[in-house]
Image (tube, rainbow, N blue to C red):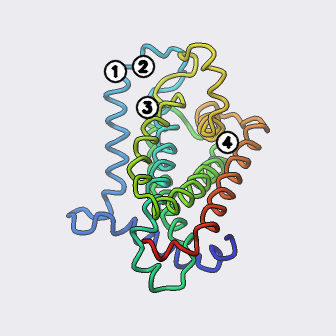
Amino acid sequence: MLPSLVKHRSYIWRTAWAEVRDRYAGAGLGFVWNILQPLCLILIFTVVFTSILRHSAPEIKVHYTVYLCAAMLPWQAFADCISRGTGAFIQNAIYLRKLPIPEQVFVAQSALTSAIGLVISYVILVIVAVCLGHYPSWHWLLLPVPMALLIAMGFGIGLALGTLNAFIRDVGQLVPVLLQIGFWTYPIVYHRKHLPEPFDHLVQFNPLFPYLDGIRQLFIDRHVPDPWMWLAMFGWTGAAAIAGSFVLRRLRDELRDVI
């Protein structure tokens, strides 16, 4: 799988960037909406969640907007990556039928689009965080690693779900429901200490925990995550990639006939 992605890297980058650039084609502000949307989202979090939850979370030592968005933005990119990956084969059916392009290229393009969106939104968060008094640290230079691994895990999951969705269209309807449930399985909008026992310990077994907690440790606590968290990130990402490749390999012969 990796050699084909490297071979088609130019196509993946070109189509992903084109999707980001043209997502709001026809709108008066065009590309600017890629900046305005995450900025508005951060401002809404600032007004709504700060007033509702800030005083109920004394454990949070930074502005609540920084705490919330540090994990919320990566989660949204991860969810977007899975959603796009799930529909990638169906949406690109015309190309799959006519062109000898490896199937995983279309899921990779979707993942890269989500990654570009994450970069844009996190740059905005950095600016907002500095304005709120949370200043940069050298630890921030490590942020691309857990973010890239998180998107890569989303790519593997999206590859598996996208393949299954071509055969069972209910998969595409089920994914948004599962993502809604998954959102609350990690303490994004609340602090971990608010979880009752034994859930405050069980949350560490959530596949998303090492990624989102690692990002928060780097961005908020200015602390390098423990080695076991890095191992868990690489492990979950590798497992997702293997699972996605396995599902695609088993169903590839019939895939282009059913879409």
Q: Is residue 69 left or right of residue 146?
A: left
Q: Is residue 149 left or right of residue 175?
A: right
Report how far apart the C-alphas of labels 3 and 4 lie in the structure: 19 Å
Image vertical order of residue 10 relative to residue 160, above or below: below
The kind of secondary structure element at disc 3 is helix
Mark 1 or mark 4, whichever is nearer to me: 1
User: Residue 58, image x and y in percent?
Assistant: 51, 14
Please name the amino acid that badge 1 sits on.
Ser
Report how far apart the C-alphas of labels 3 and 1 lie in the structure: 11 Å
| Circle 3 residue | 65
Q: Residue at x 46, y 41 (%)?
A: 178
Q: Tag 2 or tag 3, which sits nearer the N-term? A: 2
Q: Tag 4 or tag 3, which sits nearer the N-term? A: 3
User: Residue 75, image x and y in percent?
Assistant: 50, 43
Q: Quadrant of the N terminus?
A: bottom right
Q: Is residue 250 left or right of residue 76?
A: right
Please name the amino acid that badge 2 sits on.
Arg
Disc 3, disc 4: CB below 8 Å? no
The kind of secondary structure element at disc 2 is helix
| Circle 1 residue | 51
Q: Tag 4 or tag 2, which sits nearer the N-term? A: 2
| Circle 2 residue | 54
Mark 3 or mark 4, whichever is nearer to me: 3
User: Residue 37, image x and y in percent?
Assistant: 33, 50
